[in-house]
Image (cartoon, rainbow, N blue to C red):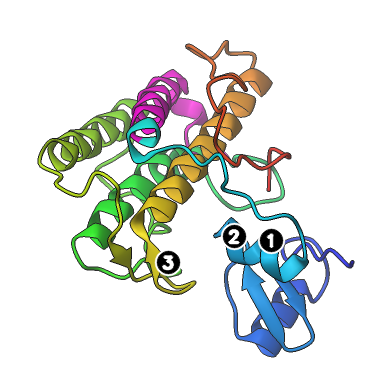
Amino acid sequence: MVVIDVLNDAGGRELLLNKYGLRKVPVLAKGDKYAFGQMLDPFAKFAGLPMPGADRLSPAQLYQKYEMIFAAGQRYARQFPPDKFLERVIPHRERLIRTLCYHVFRIGESFLETWDGAEYSVTIADNEPPDSMVSGDDVARYGAAVWQRFEAWWKTLDDRSLSRVLKTYYGDTVAHKVFERVTWHSGQHCRQLIAVLERMEIKPDGALTPADFAGLPMPERLWE
């Protein structure tokens, strides 16, 4: 197996785009076929690995996990000093701390938009925060507002099994799986925010632990 880092390997991004017409990673490719890593079941099947999901968390359990992750993301955003908020998350990637904090919550907001009929496109969660969000407090307030929308959605939700099929860039997918995807995706970025705070010698306010992520298919590495 050959692993290509599209950010750091020369020609990696061009190979992904020119051969497969893709702009999103992770992707597993073999010949002319490929599978997106965003959904683990088809990815595992394509790779010939045991299928995950036998112990998949229920929608109610995912909701509780996501509430915890959203609360943590708000705490971490508020901890970044104003003079550090526009620094890069890590030196060799362009994403700013401000953008990563916003992204934690934008992922969840994108799920709600998809539930309401939008397509979960490649770029739906990748937009930059608006100019009005200049501080960690601003971004945290945005996160709190998004979670209020989640609370309203869950309170009035008839389909608690999340059996509805949603449109995504990796194919029509049951909402339960998409909800799992956005939950661990936001959780992974919270892990990264913890690492950035620790690098700045700032003790994270209530650092999430592996036990908090139990049951979620979290990436092994921090910057995947």
Q: Which residue is mark 2?
A: 41
Q: Main secondary structure of the magenta part?
A: helix
Residue 130 visible in this rendered orientation of the protein: no
For marks 2 and 3, the one nearer the N-term is: 2
Whole-number angstrom distance, CA of label 2 to CA of label 3: 22 Å
Q: Secondary structure at mark 3?
A: loop
- In the rendered image, residue 147, in percent from the top left (x then y), is placed at 24, 34
Q: Secondary structure at mark 2?
A: helix
Residue furthest to the front in view is 54
Tell me if residue 16 comes above or below residue 43 in the rendering.
Answer: below
Q: Secondary structure at mark 1?
A: helix
Q: Looking at the figure, which quarter contains the N terminus? A: bottom right
Q: Are marks 3 and 1 in contact (CB under 8 Å)?
A: no
Tell me if residue 69 comes above or below residue 169 in the rendering.
Answer: above
Query: Residue 154's quadrant in the figure?
Result: top left
Point 50% across, 45% down: residue: 185
Whole-number angstrom distance, CA of label 2 to CA of label 1: 5 Å
Q: Which residue is mark 3?
A: 123
Q: Which range of residues does the magenta coloring cover? A: 63-87
Whole-number angstrom distance, CA of label 3 to CA of label 1: 24 Å
Q: Residues within 10 Å of mark 1 (few under 14, many from 20)?
A: some
Point 35% across, 23% down: residue: 71
Tell me if residue 170 comes above or below residue 33 in the rendering.
Answer: above
- In the rendered image, residue 47, in percent from the top left (x then y), is placed at 76, 66
Q: Which mark is residue 44?
A: 1
Report the side of 92 relative to 80 (left or right): right
Question: Disc 2 marks which amino acid?
Answer: Asp
Closest to the camera, between mark 3 and mark 1, is: 1
Question: Disc 1 marks which amino acid?
Answer: Ala
